[in-house]
Image (cartoon, grey):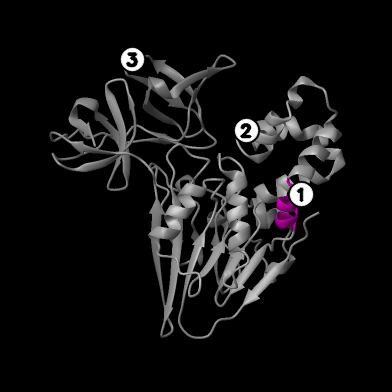
Amino acid sequence: MLAPKHLTKCVKGDYRLIAISDIHGHLDRFKALLKKVQYRPREDYLVILGDFIEKGDQVLETIHYVMELSKLPRVYVLTGNCEWALCAIMSEPELAKEIPLYLKRVSSNGIVRTLYNEGHYEDGHETPLGIQRDIARKIHKELLFCEHLPTTLKFNDFIFVHAGLEPREDYKQCGLSSYLEFQHFMDYGHLLKETVIVGHLPTSNYREGQINNDILYDEKKRIISIDGGTGVKMISQLNALIITSKNGDITFHQKKVQPLPKAIITEDYHPQYHDSHKIAFPYYKVEVLEEGTEFSKCYQEETHQILMIKNEFLYIRNKDYYCLDDYTDAFLDVKKQDEIALIGVYGQYAYGIYDGQVGWIPYHNIKIK
């Protein structure tokens, strides 16, 4: 199975490096982002921080595209927890019986789910070990590629890793789970002089009261987090961190792809001010205090918040109410002719993004382009 593998690259002079994480089988977004940053294979360095598989509907195509990119001398592909999980579930016989659970938790959409459905294994004609062997045979070269991916890349004064590092001076002695599954790494920090660049956790998870998956920079802790939530969040984007070194000066820029339709504001909308609230993973369970025709008044126990949740975002599981996904009850303050990115239309209200702010607006105030 996978053992940590560490790469080091020292570059002298000027350079441009593009870092992208958590593509999750969204090849169209990935290609669009490379085009948007004007990626130049012969001149730019490209680092992919793992989790380029599962959760999307272009997983096999994404693996093959990444495999081709990896042949270029300035491309570095690191492993993530999804690549590790795929290799484990397909190679360790004792995990064969866990494939149904894997499909439910990790790969409800992805390469294993596709091959599982194509094999009609749900009818029970094959044993768990037989299913494992059959699927592994069909994606043998893809598994081989994932199994040999490095875990970290030290590039000059930067360390790239999927999830995080333990607080130790020798980062090469961390446990594998830290590299691939460290939760809330930005809250803990590290002991190194280098800046650590990670994905794994959508950046919106770090932002209280706001749904925003732009790149996060913490100069004090020397951490940059770049996962835009693609394949995980309903409101997501694919981010590219662009690091440019020119005459010894380092600058950072962000580009993103967020494929949402646009809408134009047809008349001013200035909502009455009220405190906005946000629900985010893992605190989706709520208590409905008062049902409404469009929004229901709800209470979230762990965060002690009372907020208005759009009825379409509420569902019942085991007699308890839950919010469907990350959610905010903010309303957008916009003027006529402003443009918003449209997340969706729910009843008499539209859910959109304006100037980085997610919120609601009456549907009659917009015109979809």
Q: Dividing the picture into quarters, in which one does residue 310 lie?
A: top left
Question: CA separation, marks 1 and 3?
Answer: 53 Å
- Residue 24 got which mark? none
Q: What residue do we see at 65% from left, 40% from top? A: 111
- Residue 292 got which mark? 3
For residue 218, say whether it is visible.
no
Question: CA separation, marks 2 and 3?
Answer: 33 Å
User: Mark 2 belongs to which amino acid?
Assistant: Ser
User: Mark 3 belongs to which amino acid?
Assistant: Gly
Q: What residue do we see at 32% from left, 14% from top? A: 293
- Residue 140 got which mark? 1
For residue 55, say whether it is visible.
yes
Name the residue beneath numbered marker 2.
Answer: 108
SS at badge 1: helix
Quadrant placement of the C terminus: top left
**Which mark is first along the chain, 1 or 2?**
2
Q: For the residues labelled 2 and 3, say whether their Cβ atoms are less than 8 Å apart.
A: no
SS at badge 2: loop
**Quick check: is 141 in the magenta stretch?**
yes
